[in-house]
Image (cartoon, helix red, strand yellow):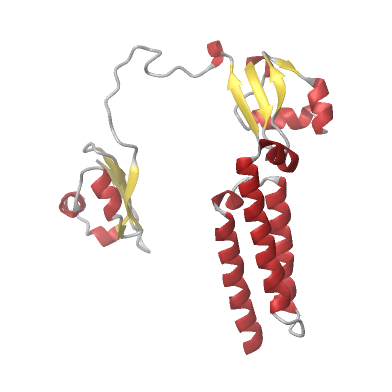
Amino acid sequence: MKLLIVRTVLIYLCVLFAMRLMGKRQLGELQPEELVSTILISNLASISIESEDVPITASLIPLFLIAAMELFGSILSFHSQKFSNLMAGRPKAVIQDGIIDQEALRTLRLTVADLMEALRGKDIFDPRLVSYAVIETNGSLSVARKPDQDTPTLADLKVEAKQANATVPFVLDGQILEENLRWCGKDRAWLERTAAANTLLPEEILLLVGNDTEDYFLLKKESRHHSGSQAG
């Protein structure tokens, strides 16, 4: 049992290091070569954990070899567009000016139902509203609406906007996020005053979010018998 625990912890740390080595994109939508390397690494890790008679180096050496190959491939892709196209393919336009390119769908082996589902994921239910849609190399759909169908901005409406930082959390489950306070020009004294104004201690706050204005939203932790929330 001890050997199993040690092998599991060691493999876990090595896989974590390998994934970090390959970069943050590995954690998001994967390119084909990234998906292959992830599957192989997971299989190698499981073999080494489950089979105690297999030397741990039998998994570690191929694991880091795959990570090195992925890293080397990403460097080649960065310097060579041809190599990048070979490994990941190219983006493919499937809608232009509201017209679905059926030949492109056949090339991608993508059904109209698949395309409509992807459009609904972008809150678009009518292809005629789309100016341009493209299937990216990772399989995701990028869409540009027609200008007359796009959501207007404040600049479009000639409305003056007050500059303010994005709303960020200041307290999460009683934990004070000092960096976010500083980013919005606030400090612990402001936080304590805000908590006191709501008859709370900072550690009694479940969630406090705000920006560089005096506006904020505060939610106190629930007790077993009652709960409450306040907003400033």
Quarter of the rendering occupied by the C terminus: top left
**Residue 101 higher or lower than 120, as above or below:** above
Identify the residue at image location x=20%, y=46%.
Answer: 186
Question: Where residue 180 sits in the image (x, y, percent)?
Answer: 30, 49
Q: How many marks?
A: 0
Looking at this view, is 110 or 93 the one in front?
93
Question: Where residue 18 sits in the image (x, y, percent)?
Answer: 60, 63
Looking at this view, is 72 or 165 the one in front?
72
Question: Where residue 68 sits in the image (x, y, percent)?
Answer: 64, 60
Identify the residue at image location x=78%, y=29%.
Answer: 113
**Residue 24 higher or lower than 86, as above or below:** below
Looking at this view, is 153 or 32 the one in front?
32
Q: Residue furthest bottom?
A: 2
Question: Where residue 46 sits in the image (x, y, percent)?
Answer: 72, 71
**Residue 14 higher or lower than 217, as above or below:** below
Quarter of the rendering occupied by the N terminus: bottom right
Looking at this view, is 72 or 183 the one in front?
72
For residue 21, which quarter of the picture?
bottom right
Identify the residue at image location x=66%, y=24%.
Answer: 133
Q: Is residue 77 found left or right of 20 in the rendered image?
A: right
Identify the residue at image location x=61%, y=48%.
Answer: 75
